[in-house]
Amino acid sequence: MIKHFITLQWKSFFRSASLGKDLGVRIFMGFLALYFMGSFLLLGIALYPVLTELYPGEDQLSTANSLVLYWIAAELVCRFFIQTLPVMDIRPLLLLPVKKGKAIHYLLLKSVFSLFNLFPLLVAIPFAIYGAAKGGYEPRVMFVWIVAVCGLVLSVNFLNFLLKKKLAGTMKTFFPFLLVVLALALCEYFEVLPLSALFGSLLGAVTAYPVLLCVLLLLPVLLYMVNYATLKKHFYLDASIGRKGVQGSTADMGWVRKFGDIAPFLQLDLKLIWRNKRPKSTVWLSLFFLAYGLMCYTNPAYRDTPVWYVFVGIFISGAFMINFGQFIPSWDSPYYGMMMAQNIPLKKYLASKYGLMGFSVVVLYLLSVPYVYFGWEILVLNTACALYNIGVNIPVLLYAGAYNKKRVELDKSPFLNYQGTGAAQFVVILPLIVFPVILWLIVRQFVSFDAASSALALLGITGIMLREPMLNAMAKLYKKRKYVAINGFKQRES
Amino acid sequence: MITVSDLTKTYGETTVLYIEELEIPSGQSLGLVGNNGAGKTTFFSLLLDLIRPTSGYIANHDIMVNKSEAWKPFTSAFIDESFLIGYLTPEEYFYFTGELRGWNRADVEVFLQKYETFFNGEILRKNKYLRDLSKGNQKKVGIIAALIGNPKVVILDEPFANLDPTTQIRLKEIVRELAEDNGVTVLISSHDLIHVTEVCKRIVVLDKGEVIRDMQTTPETLRELEGIFAG
């Protein structure tokens, strides 16, 4: 049976409609994975000497043990946002003569082979080997330690699924949990209750008395069983796998009407952003980038290379524009056919996207005005960048959008989601950010700071004045590309 | 009036649609029948300019559909669920379509009152997003939305599929009323020979992309059609 499951998996990967098209993205992800593996391996090799240096005179193994809790906490957070149990994949199996238990076992066992479980071992194993070879630890002790770490890794793996099930999406359970975690973290911080040290000595006890290993290894087994039981209970189409009917709200949004004939599209876009997981995350992300300035302006290292400020300036006011704009018109991909058959002039459609992004730039710019505290020239530069964003970058994004033909599933999780990403998304970054930075750098080098900022602002203002003819030209382009887009948006990725 | 002339659509070597000539006068209700792959949806997609014809053209009230967009204000369609916006409530979706077709909220509300029985209390004021409705209810929303704004041409792809018997009967009344009382050109495709012969004044049979029969509906039509498809 397991063999069948594995061949199914294999086929779903290689027969996926988007394999060829997505190869670039996959290779990129592969490099990312290799990069992380390399980094963790290096950390593992260096850990022993580093600990010796940082905590001289202390036992390296117990120092490492006292850090394990931090690692687990960080890992749990990462996993919580990125790793998911692909429950949907077994949906078709419900009707086939496959024992429920087997499908669930397969699903859970498969999760053991996740890269997430490899990362901690890449750190732990070199450390153990180093300790045994150079540190004078008994190989037997280190072996027990590794087994214990494996047990912990698996526990975290299964604990994550349980937490996700209980916490994700429901504020009611999430907030109490967050409070408890915060309280524990504060206890640790103010040394009321030294949790990490306690946890470390527990691990130490395991290496001292290997019999305790049996107790520790019971933990993942137990969590596995709990996972199994909950999954089995909810393994019906209408339970966890089926969609939950969320209470919708008919929002009026009468105030949008002021924007004239692009109002219906603006309303639609605002609802799109607010009611779907992935577009919603672009809003949070742009607020995060707003805070990015705080990191950059306070850092004296950037003072000498003000060209960084151009980069930051573009990002601060343009974060939403970039994140949202690069997937135009893919956001509308699930119903693009309707949009093209309905009584919608393409120019109005584009004008509304233009308006939305322009509005976001203005709002983010206004929010960034307090950065004037770090100097007038920052305000001047940010103003120039905001103008450049509106006048030049928005048309560039809309232009690039004409070549988007990949469907975006709106309610998929936004984390590490490369759906809808193609070469266009990478290429467009160049004119968006690199060009203004280079231009600014050249003008400043040969003329002055003010001239460089004015150049950006002037380009932006020119772009704003040319808005109408540019929108007309783009409407023509979108019309030409619409057949390709409609066809592309129909292709669902598996 | 819709005129089709020398229309072909080919993918690589295979021709999926070839219609030499077809004229649909205004106010006619036309049923398009044919087995899977006969080219019904392809024809509708060409009519809506969602795919490009390989050769030939379709003119909708003298407007070449792949040259100008002027047919859009008086043409509406429901092809499949990709015509729905999943994250809107039914009301919002109706208002949105209304706004695109020059109706304000009040117009849409008056219009919707007529269809209270059709919706059977399962659609309006339920505070549910379209993506959370059942397939049948989604279809009801799509069909009714296609009638908003007094279109002159209405295109419905497989409107009877997935609907319960009561709704099918009500839908038949709606379609008949559209064509007979309001002079709307209605194009319907269906696999259900009984429904389509009951509703449409004219039946066109497609087979492997070509028109093999074009007839006015008479009491004998159903038996004739069954003869065609049986053999």
Image: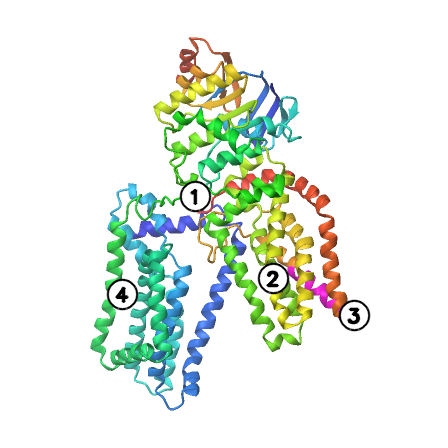
Which label number is shown at residue A412?
none
Q: Earlier in the sequence, mark 2 or mark 1?
A: 1
Q: Earlier in the sequence, mark 4 or mark 1?
A: 4
Q: Earlier in the sequence, mark 4 or mark 3?
A: 4
Locate residue A486: give its quadrant.
top right
Q: Which chain does tag 1 point to?
A: A
* Label 4, label 3: how far apart the Cα atoms are: 64 Å
* Label 2, label 4: how far apart the Cα atoms are: 44 Å
Q: Is residue A439 magenta?
A: yes
How does the figure colour the protein chain or chains? rainbow
- Which of pointers 2 and 3 indicates the residue nearer the eye? 2
Give the residue at mark 1: A249
Dot 4 alpha-carbon crowd within 10 angstroms: few under 14, some 14 to 19, many 20 or more: many
Q: Amino acid at mark 3?
A: Phe
Q: Secondary structure at mark 1?
A: loop
Which label number is shown at residue A315?
2
Give the residue at mark 3: A446
Dot 3 alpha-carbon crowd within 10 angstroms: few under 14, some 14 to 19, many 20 or more: few
Q: Earlier in the sequence, mark 2 or mark 4?
A: 4
Which residue is found at the position 46% from the left and 51% from the top? A277
* Label 2, label 3: how far apart the Cα atoms are: 25 Å
Same subunit, tags 4 and 1: yes
- x, y percent for residue B97: 53, 34
The boundaries of the magenta stretch are A433-448
Same subunit, tags 2 and 1: yes
Q: Please name the predominant secondary structure of the magenta segment in the image.
A: helix
Q: Earlier in the sequence, mark 2 or mark 3?
A: 2
